[in-house]
Amino acid sequence: MKNQSKILRAMSQDGSARAFVINSTDIVNEAIRFHHTTPTASAALGRTLTAASFMGTMLKEKEHSLTLRFQGDGPAGTIIAVADYYGNVKGYIQNPGVDLPKKSNGKLDVGRAVGRGFLSVCRDLGLKEPYISQSPIVTGEIAEDVTNYYAVSEQTPTLCALGVLVDVDYTCKAAGGVLIQLLPYADENTVDLIERNAQFLTSVSSLIAEGKTNQDILDIAFQDIPYDLFDEIDVDYLCDCSRERTARALLAIGEKEVNDVLAEQGQVEVCCHFCDKKYVFTAEDCQKLFAEQAKEEETESDSE
Ligand code: ZN
C-alpha cells in the first residue's frame, strides 16, 4: 500500500519559530526503487530528498524550483535532489552502490559516504541566472550540513533532524524529518524550549516507525510551546521528464555528436537520471529534430 508522504506546517503562537514535519517514507521508497541503492546510499539520498522537500515548500512562487547538491569527496559521489514549490522531489546519487561498514553505534555511515566538500543550494526563480549559495559540508550526515548552510548562507538559526530507517529487505521502513527555523526577534524562552525538546528528536525515523504521526512529532518538537497549525500537504517523488525535454537536450548536444552515437548504436537511447525512464530516438527521429531546428533558425534569420 502506498503510504503518502506528507508535510505538516506550523508556527509558534508568539511568532518565534516556524516548524515543518515530514513523513517521507514513500518518497524514499520510490528513490530506492528507481536507483537500486544500498542501505547507505538510501540513507544519504533519502535524507537529501527529505531536506529538499522542506526547502521546496519555502519557495515563494509556483514556478520556482530548488536544487540541493552535495558535492563531497566520499565514495557516494555527488548527491542531488530537486524540489518544486509544492515540496515534490526527485533525486540522484552518483554511486548508488556505495557500501561502508556501519558506525560503532550501529548506524549507517552516511558521513563517510558523503565525505567533505560543498553543499550548494540553487534556486531557479525564473530569472536569467539561477541564484546559487554554498556552504561547506561539515559532517556529511546531511542534517547538520543543512543546519550549517542556513546559519552560514542565510543567517537563519535552524534546527534540522532527518532520518531514514532501512529495513532488512533494503526497503525504507520509515523516513522523515523536522525543520524548525527561528524568526527575527524570537523569544528567548521559546528558543530554550525548542533546544530542550530537540533532544527527543534525535531519531525521527524511529518515532515514525513506532507509528507516530506528523502531529505527534510536532507535539514533541513544540512541547510547552503554544502553536498554530497551518496545513498538511501531500508530497511525492515526482519526475517531470518528457520526450520533448529529452529532444531539447539532444539538440543542445548537437548534430555531430548525435550522429556519432547513431553510427555506433543505430539509435539514441537517453535514460532519465532521476526516474530511469528510457527515451529512444531512431535515426529518422533525430533527422527530423535537427531539420526542424534548422528550419526555425532560418525563419528567425529571415525575420531579422
Ligand atoms: Zn524522469
Image (cartoon, helix red, strand yellow):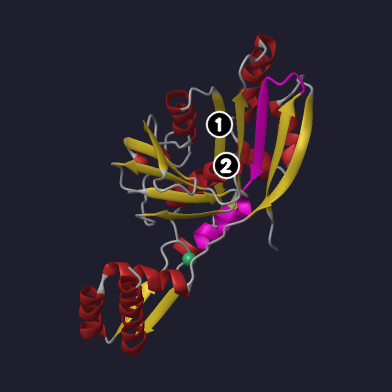
- Under circle 1, the secondary element is strand
Q: Which residue is mark 1?
A: 160
CA distance for labels 1 and 2: 18 Å
Q: Which numbered tag is attached to residue 59? A: 2
Amino acid bearing label 1: Cys
Residue lying at the far bottom of the rendered structure: 284
In the rendered structure, which segment of residues is drawn in magenta? 13-33
Residue 217: x and y in percent read 71, 34
Name the spot of residue 127 as percent of width and height, x first: 45, 47
Residue 133 or 4: which is nearer the viewer? 133
Quadrant housing the C terminus: bottom left
Q: Which mark is residue 176?
A: none
Residue pictured at 67% horizontal, 12% vertical: 187
Q: Quadrant of residue 228?
A: top right
Q: Residue at (25%, 83%) from the top-left corner?
A: 262
Q: Is residue 24 magenta?
A: yes
Q: Check the image and report above or below for 1 versus 14.
A: below
**Which badge, 1 or 2, comes first in the chain's sequence?**
2
The x and y percentages for residue 182 are 61, 22
